[in-house]
Image: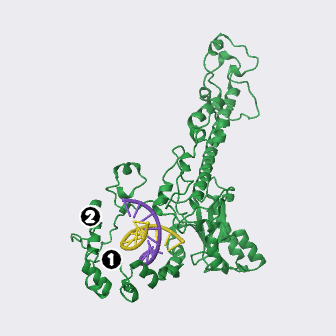
Chain colours: A green, B yellow, C purple
DNA sequence: GTTCTAGAAC
DNA sequence: GTTCTAGAAC
């Protein structure tokens, strides 16, 4: 149980020792990223005062609550293109950590660490107490009643999952995550469209301003017209004049085509057969279609930029449909997702709109990085076949060995193929009938005949209960459950 | 709470 | 060979 208390204390430890992970700090609280974010943006505002959880708050803590909310607003304001309405702010009633922490989490819930139904229920049931609710309870009652363990367990395991952005309901985490991915993808498109439109609007404003400047400076007769406004600005006096142009003035257009009641001369008549070149709006509209069409939202793309972009024409979410139906053996009895299957679920991405950089995505540990551990790099993936890809890479557990000493268990310095061979030798050692009999009959023999390959640090040590008592001859798993129900104690 | 992984189960 | 589970470690 000691390791659980260590884990519970990890937040305080991080607060005290890992100052570099703190984003905003005050004398009463600090803002840091959640270690396992359940959405694209997930922050913790950790209280510095030794308060274990929200149910220990009293009325005198209302100023502390307000201060934590101030920090929450500060960190939300730092996130571009997201407003406070996109965030949930509050406390977990069944918090695991032993220090009061306010969660600030974006409502997309698109994250690698979002893996369990209980993760969803922690934020979308009575397990989550919003800041407003906590404030109201402290003001009215002066305290916050804790949830019973039974009630918390019941709320955690609710399987009716209601989308937090629409009326969609499902009973499987798989469908919910596929659905949430659509919401996230749409929002990313909206943000991208907004950025592009802002950029285009800015360019249009600048070009209109230039046009107005040129119209004020342009001579009245076509014979004196000069083709480029930049040439006029080469004269310093002209340049000064352009700086005092008022937006309200409507000067005669520099383009003869745009002047009302203008009769073109011979030269202009000849030009009329040429393409219409001087229409800035049209020019930039075409530019926008060429440059930004792939990024437009389907609805905006249809009305503003001409034909629908490719992702709006076909079944854009066709690649996602495979996630709609839960596949067999993807979920276990606890409705959690197997790690490997989960990565398979995340792997396919639309080629039309690559996802935005994930600020929380963990970078691989480059010390142990090799081509076998790089499932997302397509160039490396091409080089890996099923046959030469080991299921796991042994970690360098034998660093204590002196250099030059050839240890049979030291697979960290070997090639992967050699590591595979070393792994294949393990069952042969286990099948030694004498050794197996010794393990079953006398635990002390284990100390006398240790596994030589793993002599320095055995990966698994059978417990004394396995070789003692009435479960001696039962199979191992049954003996484990009967003699050592630690799992039940943890839960 | 989380990840990782050996061994069991399929 | 693949998936699940339990235990260890953080």
Residue occupying the point 59% across, 26% down: A231
Residue A195 location, quadrant = top right
Question: Picture quarter containing residue A290?
Answer: top right
Q: Residue at x 43, y 79 (%)?
A: A478
Observer-nearest of A71 and A153: A153
Q: Residue A435: image x %, image y %?
A: 26, 80
Tell me, yes or no, whether the two marked residues, 1 and 2, touch with CB atoms within 8 Å. no
Question: On screen, A90 above or below A290?
Answer: below
Query: Which residue is found at the position 28% from the left and 84% from the top?
Result: A438
| x and y, in percent, of residue A116 in the image | 56, 66
Between the C-alphas of marks 1 and 2, the distance is: 18 Å
Q: Chain of mark 1?
A: A
User: Residue at left 65%, top 80%?
Assistant: A148
Q: Which residue is mark 1?
A: A458
Residue under numbered circle 2: A421
Disc 1 crowd rating (10 Å Cα; few below 14, some 14-19, many 20+) is: few
In this picture, is C10 found above or below A277?
A: below
């Amino acid at each position: 149980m000691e390791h659980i208390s260590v884990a519970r204390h990890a937040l305080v430890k991080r607060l005290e020792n890992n100052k570099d992970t703190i984003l905003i700090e005050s004398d009463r609280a600090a803002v840091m990223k959640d270690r396992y974010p359940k959405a694209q943006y997930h922050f913790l505002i950790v209280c510095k005062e030794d308060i274990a959880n929200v149910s220990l708050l009293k009325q005198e803590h209302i100023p502390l609550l307000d201060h934590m909310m101030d920090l929450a607003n500060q960190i939300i304001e730092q996130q571009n293109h997201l407003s406070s309405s996109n965030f949930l702010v509050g406390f977990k009633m069944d918090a695991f950590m032993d220090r009061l922490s306010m969660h600030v989490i974006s409502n997309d819930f698109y994250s690698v660490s979002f893996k369990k139904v209980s993760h969803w229920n922690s934020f979308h049931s009575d397990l989550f107490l919003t800041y407003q609710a906590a404030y109201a309870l402290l003001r009215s009652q002066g305290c916050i009643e804790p949830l019973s363990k039974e009630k918390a367990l019941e709320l955690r395991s609710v399987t009716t999952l209601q989308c937090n952005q629409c009326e969609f309901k499902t009973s499987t985490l798989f469908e919910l995550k596929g659905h949430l991915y659509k919401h996230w993808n749409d929002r990313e498109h909206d943000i991208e469209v907004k950025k592009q439109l802002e950029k285009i609007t800015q360019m249009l404003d600048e070009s209109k301003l230039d046009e107005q400047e040129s119209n004020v400076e342009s001579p009245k007769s076509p014979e004196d017209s000069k083709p480029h406004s930049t040439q006029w600005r080469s004269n310093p006096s002209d340049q000064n004049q352009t700086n005092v142009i008022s937006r309200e003035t409507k000067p005669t257009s520099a383009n003869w085509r745009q002047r009302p009641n203008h009769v073109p001369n011979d030269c202009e008549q000849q030009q009329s057969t040429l393409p219409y070149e001087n229409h800035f709006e049209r020019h930039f509209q075409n530019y926008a279609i060429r440059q930004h069409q792939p990024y437009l939202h389907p609805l905006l793309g249809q009305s503003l930029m001409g034909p629908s972009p490719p992702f709006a024409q076909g079944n854009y979410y066709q690649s996602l449909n495979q996630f709609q139906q839960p596949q067999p053996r993807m979920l276990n009895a606890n409705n959690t997702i197997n790690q490997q299957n989960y990565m398979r679920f995340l792997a396919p991405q639309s080629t039309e709109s690559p996802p935005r950089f994930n600020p929380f995505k963990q970078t691989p540990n480059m010390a142990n990085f090799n081509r076998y551990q790089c499932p997302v790099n397509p160039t490396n993936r091409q080089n890996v076949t099923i046959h030469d890809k080991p299921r796991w890479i042994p970690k360098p557990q034998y660093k204590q060995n002196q250099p030059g000493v050839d240890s049979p268990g030291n697979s960290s310095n070997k090639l992967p193929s050699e590591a595979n061979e070393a792994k294949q030798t393990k069952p042969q050692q286990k099948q030694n009938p004498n050794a197996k009999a010794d393990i079953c009959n006398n635990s002390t023999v284990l100390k006398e005949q240790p596994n030589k390959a793993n002599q320095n640090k055995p990966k698994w040590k059978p417990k004394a209960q396995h070789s003692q008592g009435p479960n001696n001859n039962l199979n191992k798993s049954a003996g484990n459950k009967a003699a050592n129900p630690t799992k039940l104690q943890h839960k």
